[in-house]
Image: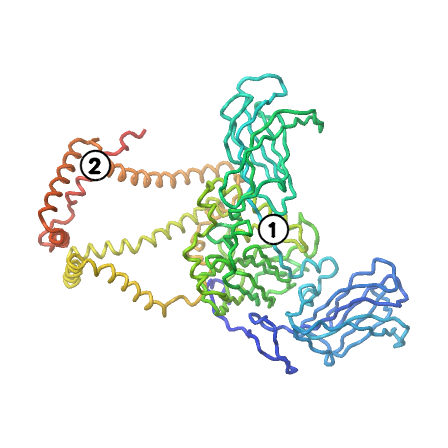
């Protein structure tokens, strides 16, 4: 694999259903997007009649060893309920040993199983029933002790696969094993909470009567704090009429705390507080009027509530008609409203097979050598999935498959690969962050239905020292459609719920609410086991993507130029026609124009038919691969080190004052050029407006007389003849024109006045 090969590669993994095991049984599992992996499963349930009250069970095959947790409760009949999974391709022995130990050196008893005699289980068969096996001591004598377990050969389709200890994590035991397991997470449903602050009355300042008080409202919901503006009525009966927006999480167990603050220089004094329980707040899905209510304020001093401190007039509602944006709207994975009553039926199913990765870079050092403990996270809608961690390998094989319901084809699934940095320090929330190996996004609307896409995607990470390829990940993706009519109908429906258009939120509000939603998701997913930590969640949600970046600015400018290139090419072609660079083309253009003028009713049909033919002609040239991260489009390969250093700088900046001044001056230069472009556009618009404004009386007189004469000419001469003469004049032969001289309309338009003269 070339280190600088950032292309997408189509692969041919050994996937698909209906294949048979070596013993002849057919694989009936729905795991048909991943390669079949056979595991030796051992379910250890419990033991009885042991001579020791403190024991554990160790499972050994070849050099692989797995052990249960120690029996914490002194009991000769301990219970374990643990599952071990050994990859059959890596088995290094023919005998499975199950030993009950009092400690690392003392063996209480053991039993053995021949690997060749272990039965095979194929889901959806019921789980294999565990049974009691007698234990023998080190001399081969039975002493009455027994262990209950079940042993079978299975695949990753077994229901115990996610909870099992895997031989891929042979160095991970105890509490660390939880961190390495695969899990499915459901993010909580989020709602917008709208608090319309109208006014307050009967407020009394703590320090006596004061003139011109500056009073504002602070709202507290969990760890989120939102401030209103200072009331413009500088009295003790302030008026705001302002919306304060929060993000609330179901099942609405929190309370909203509103505090009225009076500014005293750099400090603020609390005039009173009120508490509103979210469970009692009205919920709405349409912009119906919400009744306003008065809430009493209580003054709190040293945790003592003296009594009444005024009242505040509010409209409070939980907005279920909005979609809470936790991702960028350009590549969101869900657009449904918060209220489940507004959800439409699913239109399809998305299936993702996370097969393997290859060529991963070493992310950390262990025992004096580079290593990587990789796991994969995928996010679509409210469902997050995390594969198991494969320890100490640069070519991990996960072969795990997940499914999601699809409600809109214009959505994106995000897949990220990370290095697990917490295997050695489990439960340390302040430990090192999981290193980012790479991330890809796949838009569902670019996929054909019922087709399996198997590709190897480059894992690309942009770092302060440049763009780097961290490896490749092999995925299999399939989009199934339950109703083609419903899927096609989605293209005619609004992208966002109706509330976004009936009562739109400002850009500032959306940005603030997205930060709140990201914070809430990080808090909730961080409390799971194993946790999805803040650094992983923020990377998957592309948090902080709106920070200034010269690289992204140049990339977006190039995208804009590419869009207008077609129009520029058309203008260049028309200019060449007018200059008769190709006489045959110019004569053909004359005939086409005559066709348009004298047969106008056939023009639109001809254009539509042309688009139809071109569309079906390009069907065989359609893209065969899903889109992937493009470093050339992103300008990542041509970004300068100083530009990348600025992009990765924190906010606020942590650089030296001289460097910040240099970058600020550069930004001023870029903004100055943008200001000139905006000024030129405004000038052209004002010139059009001043055609009839009499700002320039002679210009307006000339334009008015031209309109009068043109009206008479059009009335007396046929429009078809007039258009023909005009077109023939524009495309006249070079011998009849003078080049490099602006035309009369251009000269007249450039002389029109604008308001640029009034600018300071």
Task: Please name the residue shown 48% across and 37% down the image.
Answer: 658
Q: In which quarter of the image is the C terminus?
A: top left
- Location of residue 710 by image quarter: top left
Label 2 CA crowd tier, 10 Å (few <14, some 14–19, many 20+): many
Q: Depth check: 293 or 619 in front?
A: 293
The picture places residue 581, in percent across and down from the top left corner, at 16, 59
Q: Earlier in the sequence, mark 1 or mark 2?
A: 1
Total numbered circles: 2
Direction from residue 329 to residue 135 in the image, left or right? right
Task: Please name the residue shown 14% across and 52% down the image.
Answer: 723
State the residue position of label 2. Answer: 691
In the displayed structure, 133 sits above or below 505; it is: below
State the residue position of label 1. Answer: 188
- Image depth: mark 1 or mark 2 in front: 1
The picture places residue 504, in percent across and down from the top left corner, at 45, 42
* Local secondary structure at mark 2: loop
- Location of residue 304 by image quarter: top right
In the displayed structure, 138 sits above or below 730; it is: below
Residue closest to the far bottom = 24
Label 1 CA crowd tier, 10 Å (few <14, some 14–19, many 20+): some
The picture places residue 371, in percent across and down from the top left corner, at 63, 61
Real-space Cα separation, disc 1 to disc 2, in angstroms: 58 Å
* Local secondary structure at mark 1: loop
Task: Please name the residue shown 69% across and 63% down the image.
Answer: 163
Direction from residue 482 to residue 176 in the image, left or right? right
Tell me how the rendering is colored: rainbow
In the displayed structure, 545 sits above or below 653; it is: below
């Amino acid at each position: 694999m070339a280190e600088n090969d950032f292309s997408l590669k189509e692969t041919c993994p050994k996937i698909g259903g209906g294949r048979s095991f070596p013993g002849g049984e057919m694989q009936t599992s729905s795991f048909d997007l991943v390669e079949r992996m056979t595991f030796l499963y051992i379910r250890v349930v419990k033991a009885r009649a042991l001579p020791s009250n403190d024991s554990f069970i160790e499972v050994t095959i070849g050099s692989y060893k797995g052990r249960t947790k120690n029996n914490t409760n002194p009991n000769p009949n301990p219970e374990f309920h643990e599952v071990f999974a050994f990859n059959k391709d890596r088995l290094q022995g023919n005998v499975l040993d199950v030993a009950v130990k009092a400690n690392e050196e003392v063996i209480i008893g053991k039993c053995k199983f021949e690997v060749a005699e272990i039965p095979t289980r194929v889901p959806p068969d019921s789980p294999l029933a565990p049974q009691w096996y007698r234990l023998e001591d080190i001399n081969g004598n039975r002493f009455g002790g027994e262990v209950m377990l079940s042993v079978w050969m299975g695949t990753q389709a077994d229901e115990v696969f996610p909870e099992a200890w895997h031989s891929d994590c042979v160095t991970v035991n105890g509490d660390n094993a939880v961190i390495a397991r695969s899990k499915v997470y459901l993010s909580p449903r989020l709602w917008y909470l709208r608090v319309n602050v109208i006014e307050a009355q009967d407020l009394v300042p703590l320090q006596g009567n004061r003139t011109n008080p500056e009073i504002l409202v602070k709202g507290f919901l969990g760890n989120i704090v939102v401030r209103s503006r200072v009331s413009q009525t500088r009295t003790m009966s302030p008026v705001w009429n302002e919306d304060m927006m929060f993000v609330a999480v179901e099942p609405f167990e929190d309370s909203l705390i509103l505090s009225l603050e009076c500014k005293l220089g750099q400090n603020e004094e609390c005039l009173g507080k009120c508490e509103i329980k979210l469970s009692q707040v009205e919920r709405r899905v349409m912009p119906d009027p919400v009744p306003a209510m008065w809430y009493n304020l209580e003054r709190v001093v040293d945790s003592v509530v003296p009594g009444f401190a005024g009242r505040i007039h509010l409209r409070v509602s939980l907005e279920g008609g909005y979609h809470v944006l936790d991702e960028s709207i350009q590549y969101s994975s869900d657009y449904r409203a918060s209220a489940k009553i507004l959800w439409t039926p699913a239109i399809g199913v998305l299936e993702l097979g996370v097969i393997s990765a290859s060529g991963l870079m070493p992310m950390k050092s262990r025992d004096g050598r580079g290593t990587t403990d990789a796991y994969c996270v995928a996010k679509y809608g409210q469902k997050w999935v995390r594969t198991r961690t494969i320890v100490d390998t640069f070519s991990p094989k996960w072969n795990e498959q997940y499914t999601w319901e699809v409600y809109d084809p214009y959505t994106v699934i995000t897949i990220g690969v990370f290095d697990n940095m917490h295997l050695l320090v489990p439960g340390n929330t302040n430990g090192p962050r999981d290193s980012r190996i790479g991330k890809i996004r796949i838009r569902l609307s670019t996929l054909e239905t019922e087709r399996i896409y198997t590709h190897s995607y480059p894992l690309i990470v942009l770092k302060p020292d440049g763009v780097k390829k961290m490896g490749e990940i092999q995925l299999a993706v399939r989009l199934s459609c339950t109703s083609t009519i419903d899927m096609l109908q989605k293209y005619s429906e609004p992208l966002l719920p109706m509330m976004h258009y009936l009562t739109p939120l400002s850009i500032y509000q959306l940005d603030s609410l997205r930060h709140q939603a990201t914070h809430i998701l990080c808090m909730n997913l961080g409390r799971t086991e194993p946790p999805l930590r803040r650094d992983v969640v923020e990377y998957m949600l592309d948090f902080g993507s709106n920070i200034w970046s010269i690289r992204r600015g140049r990339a977006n400018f190039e995208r804009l130029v590419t869009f207008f290139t077609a129009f520029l090419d058309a203008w260049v072609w028309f200019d060449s026609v007018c200059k008769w660079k190709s006489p045959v083309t110019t004569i053909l253009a004359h005939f086409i124009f005559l066709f348009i003028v004298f047969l106008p009713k056939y023009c639109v049909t001809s254009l539509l038919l042309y688009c139809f033919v071109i569309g079906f002609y390009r069907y065989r040239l359609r893209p065969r691969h899903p889109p992937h991260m493009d470093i050339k489009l992103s300008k990542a390969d041509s970004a300068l080190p100083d530009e990348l250093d600025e992009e990765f700088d924190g906010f606020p900046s942590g650089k030296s004052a001289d460097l910040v001044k240099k970058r600020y001056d550069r930004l001023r230069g870029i903004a100055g050029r943008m200001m000139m472009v905006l000024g030129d556009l405004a000038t052209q618009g004002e010139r059009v407006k001043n055609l009839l404004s009499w700002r320039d009386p002679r210009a307006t007189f000339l334009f008015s007389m031209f309109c009068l004469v043109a009206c008479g000419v059009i009335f007396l001469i046929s429009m078809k003849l007039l258009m023909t003469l005009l077109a023939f004049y524009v495309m006249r032969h070079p011998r009849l024109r003078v080049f490099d001289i602006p035309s009369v309309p251009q000269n007249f338009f450039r002389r029109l006045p604008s308001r640029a003269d009034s600018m300071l």
